[in-house]
Image: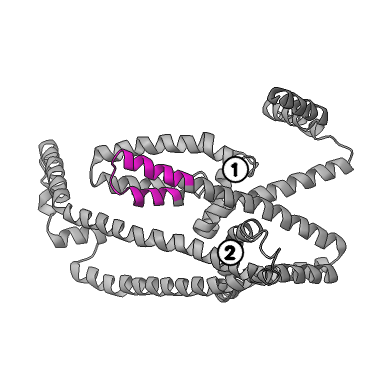
Amino acid sequence: MLVILFTIVLIFFFINISSVVKVLDTVFKVLAPIMYGLVIAYLLNFPFKFIKDRIFKNMGNKHAWLKKVKTPLALILTYLFVFGIVAFLVSTLIPEISSSVTTLIDNIPIYERTLKSAADNVVDFVRNLTGYNLYEMASFSNVVALITGKDTTEFFKNLATNYIPTAFSTVLGIGTGLYNWGLGIIISIYLLSSKDKLVRQVKIVLVAYTPEKFHKRLFKIGEVFNNKCGKFIVGKIIDSSIIGVMCFIGLSIFKFHYPLLISVVIGVFNLIPFFGPIIGAVPTTFLLLIINPMEALGFLVFLIVLQQFDGNILGPKILGETVGISGFWIMISVIVGGGLFGVPGMLLGVPIFAAIYTLVEEGAQIRLKKKAISVDDVAPPTEDSSEKKTRKSIKENPIVEKASELLNKGKNK
């Protein structure tokens, strides 16, 4: 009966897929503030726990009434700290962006002269080679007709009918996004302030209404996802912050233009694994290119050195074995996550895929163990994996650990 029911639902889904997509789109739009609130609450949970459990650890030991204000005080400090940093960066970056736009506008005559000189060279080359003068097509109407295949009147009519409504819908989308994020911040405050109670209620309902095997497996999946995503996000934020500060110091020492603006862009895009440094390098290099090409070249060399330091020294030190997947799977997870969910998908695709990878690997090992089959019998270990396994077994050997501890004590004495 379950198979029949599932088949009927599946057939209905594919027959009415357009209607189902519309319904899902409406549901996601309605639930967008709640989803944003969950994301904000999850991210802010890390500084909230640090302030509450570390900074305010002994708060209320002497005076019991202080325990009542421990949670709300930690919540207020968390939001003040995080959004204070965001407000500071925005207020600092706006003058930098304004200055760069002003410089770009002031340099427009120089760019025009450079382009005119390059166009003259191309026209002379074509004239000498073919005898044809490209400037004969340089009237405005001909250029528009060449590009669009239509005359000027139709071009402007098309502009008014297509691009103006698109701009209006873009502004409306930005307003809707700001509304959703504002409401999401309010929802995140309620979620953080009562997260322990909410988690307890969810666990009670799951244990009460689902089979033991199901909710145990679900708790295990949640634990793995939380562990992978939490460690990765915190480590990546620390790593990107350090890279941003180092970039600012380096740009200031070498006297590059717009050090703060460029450092913030590099630090933010560094959150995205694999492709982040490349994406961040494009607009920042272009910004310096319109000022001085040699400065842009020097910046690229500096950025390559900085990213090599991050990829080979700083990143492994901070993240360690948090991800636990190869570079190939990191690239695939970033591409798929970015294609499905944009920038958030590029950031969260790696830890989510790492969690799935861990669960699949553990499940495969359990199934092989039930079948009394060794992993090495199915696929012989590679040279790298055997070396890692040997190092891991040596490190986990209690006798070796005890001998190392005694040896270190002897050296200290």
Taking the spot 74% from the left edge, 44% from the top edge, the residue there is: 361
Secondary structure category for the residue under label 2: helix
Quadrant in the picture for residue 18: bottom right
Quadrant in the picture for residue 301: top left
Which residue corresponds to mark 2? 39
Which residue corresponds to mark 1? 319
Task: Return the x and y of residue 233 as percentages of the image width and height.
Answer: 58, 52
Residue kind at label 2, given as amino acid type: Val
- 103 left or right of 226 in image: left
Above or below, 193 relative to 57 = below
Of the numbered discs in the image, which one, if any, rests on residue 387?
A: none
Q: Tell me the quadrant of the picture where the C terminus can be found.
A: top right
Spatial distance from mark 2 to mark 1, Cα to Cα?
21 Å
Q: Tell me the quadrant of the picture where the N terminus can be found.
A: bottom right
The region drawn magenta spans 242-267
**Colour mapping:** one colour
- 219 left or right of 35 in image: right
**Can I make out residue 28 in this image?**
no
Task: Return the x and y of residue 179 as percentages of the image width and height.
Answer: 47, 75
- Is residue 321 located in the magenta-colored stretch of the structure? no
- Is residue 260 located in the magenta-colored stretch of the structure? yes
**Can I make out residue 281 in this image?**
yes
Above or below, 311 relative to 99 = above
Task: Return the x and y of residue 298 as percentages of the image width and height.
Answer: 31, 36
Task: Return the x and y of residue 74 as percentages of the image width and height.
Answer: 60, 65
Taking the spot 55% from the left edge, 56% from the top edge, the residue there is: 345
- The numbered mark, 2 or 1, whose residue comes first in the sequence reads 2
Taking the spot 60% from the left edge, 49% from the top edge, the residue there is: 232
- 396 left or right of 249 in image: right
Residue kind at label 1, given as amino acid type: Leu
